[in-house]
Image: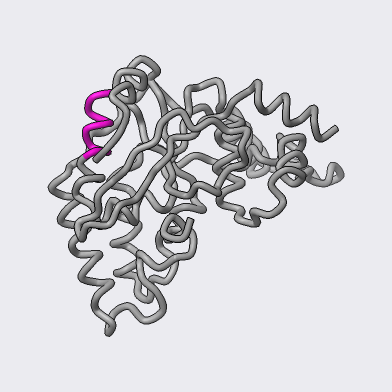
Amino acid sequence: MNRPTNLPKSENDKLIEEFRLKVFTFKPSKSKKPKMLDIVDIQKKAKLLEEMDNNEDVVLEGSFHTTRRAERHHTS
Amino acid sequence: MLYSKDLFTQLAEQNATILLDTNVFSTAARSIDFSTFLSELKAKTGVSFATVQAVLFETTQGSSTIEIYNQRAGFVSLFIDTMLPTQFIEKIPDFSVFMAKVNALNKSFTDFQLAACLYYYRHTNIYFLSSDQKALPTFFDRPYIMTAVQNKGGLVNFGVYTFNEANYAKALKSTQ
């Protein structure tokens, strides 16, 4: 979206503009080494999520596994 | 877990980034087989995992408490290295118009953003992992497929997708 050109540029505007430029020129970084996955932690949290999903007193309106797109593979 | 033997060796040579769809996280939460595979894939190939905010939104949708939201968001963050920005979409109107033509039946903005990432970052060896076979139009390649076994025995098929410049140009030409 173009900002109105008749507005004066404040310091904040400049910072926003710099941020936008950074975002627009973003490329997936290869300088940082990808983190390794902690499979024990993943399993621990997966179990917790499953327990939460199974607990109807806690999950009122949906669960981690019931979003439409998350489940699309079951019908395709 | 079933997958092509070439997957690890080919990805290892590319320093690739893999975009993860919502179904990756829901399957990882109920498949030790699949989450172990993702862990090995990273360890052996050095790929980085990324996603977009819309996937995080879908993954946390239906959270009735902040605790549940945090647990789900925390689960996603265990996997990903980068949350890709999508503000660049306003810079690629040609792609947006083309997708509106060839992919009009798919109304998911998440799917569109993921497709746009594959297009925008296409020169950086970026892939997309999803079990949703209808997420992307056919000009995207699916060089690898795999099958994960869930803890309760069910099977889920995944595809690894990538942008194909030649197919895109061909499809673009056919719509003009």
Residue at left offset 25%, top offset 72% = A52
Q: Is residue B46 visible?
A: no
* Res B47 visible: yes
The quarter of the image holding the C terminus of chain B is top right
**Residue B44 is one of the magenta-drawn residues:** yes
In the image: residue B90, left or right of residue B12: right
Residue at point 55%, 48% (across, down): B135
**Location of residue B119 by image quarter:** top right
Front-most of residues A11 and A5: A5
Residue B39 to residue B64: above or below: above
Please state the extent of the stretch shown in magenta in the rendering.
B37-46
* Quadrant housing residue B13: top left
In the orientation shown, which residue stands out farthest toward the top? B13
Where's residue B84, x and y in %?
49, 39
Quadrant containing the N terminus of chain B in the rendered view: top left
Name the one closer to the observer, B105 or B128: B105
Q: Which residue of the protein is positioned furthest toward the bottom in this rendering?
A: A57
In this view, the residue farthest toward the left is: A40
Q: Quadrant of residue B175?
A: top right
Q: Residue at x 86, y 44 (%)?
A: A6
How would you classify the magenta stretch by its main secondary structure? helix
Task: Answer left or right for B160 relative to B101.
Answer: left
In the visual, does A70 lie left or right of B27? right
Colour scheme used in the picture? one colour
Image location of residue A58, percent across then percent down: 28, 80
The residue depicted at 41 percent of the width and 31 percent of the height is B144
Q: Percent from the top left, x then y, of residue B121?
A: 56, 28
Q: Is residue B113 magenta?
A: no
Image coordinates of residue A4 in percent, x first then y, are 83, 46
Count of picture labels: 0
